Image (spheres, grey):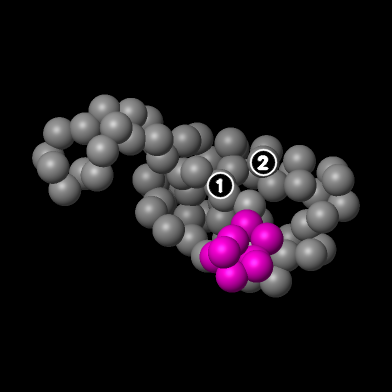
Amino acid sequence: MRRLGANVWPLNTVQFSNHTQYGKWTGCVMPPSHLTEIVQGIAAIDKLHTCDAVLSGYLGSAEQGEHILGIVRQ
């Protein structure tokens, strides 16, 4: 997306050692509050209004989905 000129703000929902298809992995699911905190930082520099779209990828928990919906509603 960046190569196409889009300004991208990645919000990592998980940090795993490898893809879960391998059956064994290590790492963690980011707490939903982490996502909200990152977006609040973007809002604090008055850039949130420049967001035209949200693309959600892997969600590590249902609660993350709820927080992402709240972020989109901003």
The quarter of the image holding the N terminus is bottom right
Q: Residue furthest left?
A: 23
Magenta span includes 72:
no
Q: Is residue 49 visible?
A: yes
Residue 71, percent across and down? 65, 56
Residue nearest the viewer, comparing 33 with 17:
17
Residue to which mark 1 is pinned: 11
Q: Position of residue 49 (x, y in %)?
A: 81, 63
Q: Which circle marks residue 38 in the picture?
A: 2
Give, as a three-letter code, the residue at label 1: Leu
Q: Residues within 10 Å of mark 2 (few under 14, many from 20)?
A: some
- Residue at 69 percent across and 47 percent down: it is 39
Q: Is 56 placed left or right of 24 in the picture? A: right
Q: Is residue 60 left or right of residue 35?
A: left
**Does the magenta stretch mainly form a helix, a strand or a loop?**
loop
Could you say whether the residue bearing mark 2 is in a helix, strand or loop?
A: helix
Q: Residue at x 67, y 41 (%)?
A: 38
Does 71 appear above or below 11?
below
Identified by mark 2, the residue type is Ile
Residue 24: quadrant of the picture: top left
Q: Which residues are drawn in magenta?
A: 1-8
Residue at position x 41%, y 40% in the image: 14
Q: Are marks 1 and 2 in contact (CB under 8 Å)?
A: yes
User: For numbered disc 1, what is the local secondary structure?
Assistant: loop
Cα–Cα span, label 1 and label 2? 7 Å
**Residue 5: percent from left, percent from top:** 65, 67
For disc 1, the neighbor class at 10 Å (few under 14, some 14 to 19, many from 20) is: some
Which x, y percent locates residue 46?
A: 87, 52
